[in-house]
Image (spheres, rainbow, N blue to C red):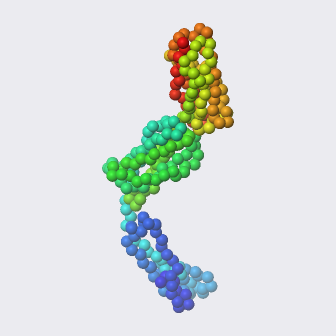
Amino acid sequence: YGYVFDGQVGYLDHALSTASLTDQVTGAAEWHINADEPNILDYDTSFKPDPVDAIYAPDPYRSSDHDAVLVGLELDEIQAVTLSAAASPDTVVFGSSSTVSGTLTNVEDGQPISGALLTLESRPAAGGVWSATGTTTTGPDGGYQFTVGPDANTAYRVVYAGDRTHERTESVPVTVNVTPRITINASDTSVRKRSTVTFFGLVAPNHAGQPVQLERQLDGAWTTVGSTTLDRDSTYVFRYTFGSKEKKLSSDFRVVKPADADHVTGTSPTVTVDVK
């Protein structure tokens, strides 16, 4: 019991612990310094005549009307840890995946920490609120990996919540950049001088209204030979006419989508057109 009222005993006060702390509790007991003591010793001196008030002493007894709950603890030493993270590859084409991996180790002795629960968090690369996207546990070597498939440039970090012997920590954020996936088709790949070739394709994800460029490789360098904006379906069309003084040769073409707030620059495969 920890409380006495009108001759009846009971308990009102409790001590609570978390799951990780419970294993470190060595014992618990009530310290009967209050409930069994007479009111004359009470800490409250209101309405007491001076002779009674003089009985008060600044000791533990009757310092409250409830008994104190004592809890014994044998706390574990909390060890510092380090959590590495890297993304490979760090740039992917839209629809492709990357791997975020690393190790969790003890700072003091460098030993791996196995069986630890890790949480992967993500947010837009430009900033924002972190949100959990997956969990895994470390292997015998302290290693882990997550497979990610971002739709746009995304920052990732790995969080270890810690346990009774290891501190909480999080990795340095790593960024996976995403390039748009660009298809390219040509209406003809073998033409004569003064002929017109139509290049058409799709940019994913949808970038309706944004610019794309048609480039041709001339004298070993890529040169912009046309520009347009993507339609509402994120498709494009270029019409390129070869000049009358074109040399008989093979010429490479590609389409480029410049970088924007959510994606880095994307480039289509090349298409070769033979000029006869």
Image coordinates for residue 29, horizontal then vertical, percent = 42, 78
Image coordinates for residue 251, horizontal then vertical, percent = 53, 17
Compared to residue 179, the image places residue 61 above or below, namely below
The answer to whether 199 appears left or right of 22 in the picture is right
From this viewpoint, which residue is outermost toward the top? 245
Image coordinates for residue 172, horizontal then vertical, percent = 47, 44
Residue in the image at 54% along x and 29% along y: 268
Image coordinates for residue 220, horizontal then vertical, percent = 50, 16
Q: Nearer the viewer, residue 214 or 104?
A: 214
From this viewpoint, which residue is outermost toward the bottom? 7
Q: Count of labels shown? A: 0
Q: Is residue 34 visible?
A: no
The answer to whether 34 appears left or right of 259 in the picture is left
Q: Nearer the viewer, residue 264 or 252?
A: 252
Residue in the image at 44% along x and 75% along y: 70
Residue in the image at 48% along x and 50% along y: 120
Q: Is residue 122 visible?
A: yes
Q: If the image is split into quadrants, where does the C terminus sit?
A: top right
Compared to residue 80, the image places residue 255 above or below, namely above
Compared to residue 22, the image places residue 269 above or below, namely above
Residue in the image at 55% along x and 24% along y: 254
Q: Nearer the viewer, residue 96 or 45?
A: 96
